[in-house]
Image: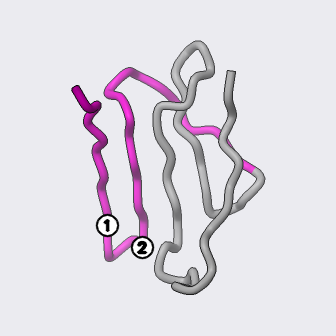
Amino acid sequence: MAEKVKVWFDAEADYLEVRFSDVAGYMKETSNDAVMERVDAAGHVIGFSILGVSRFRKDKPLEAELSTL
């Protein structure tokens, strides 16, 4: 069975959030100023968000490294 992924996009704020789990967590900075990762209490990545989505070029992917434990 496939896991569900939840995606939210706020066009007015130009903000995208993707969650892999509904577990409680907190946002943590990444090496990319536009990307934040959501991690649980144990430090596992449970989602991420991107601020300023529309400014990224369609022909070049946005890259960010998310934590892994």
- Residue lying furthest front in this view? 1
Residue 10 at x, y percent in the picture: 31, 66
Quadrant including the C terminus: top right
* CA distance for labels 2 and 1: 6 Å
Asked if the residue under mark 1 is in contact with the one under mark 2, i.e. CB atoms within 8 Å, the reply is yes
Residue at the (28%, 44%) spot, across then down: 6
- Three-letter residue code for mark 2: Asp
Residue 62 rendering spot, x and y as whole percentages = 62, 68
User: Is 35 rendered above or below residue 10?
Assistant: above
Look at 38% across and 35% down and name the residue there.
20
Q: Secondary structure at mark 2?
A: loop
Q: Is residue 12 magenta?
A: yes
Magenta residues, start to end: 1-30
Residue beneath the point at 49% across and 53% down: 49
Residue 63 image offset from top left, x and y in percent: 67, 62
Toward the viewer: 20 or 24? 20
Residue 60 lies in the magenta-colored region? no
Determine which quarter of the picture holds residue 67.
top right
In-image side of 62 versus 31 (left or right): left
Q: Which residue is mark 2?
A: 14
Which residue is label 1 attached to? 10
x, y percent for residue 13: 39, 71
Quadrant where the N terminus is found in the figure: top left
Under mark 1, the amino acid is Asp
Can you tell which quarter of the image residue 16 is in?
Answer: bottom left
Q: Name the residue: 61% across, 56% down.
A: 35
Residue placed furthest toward the right: 31
Q: Which mark is residue 20?
A: none
Residue 27 left/right relative to 3: right
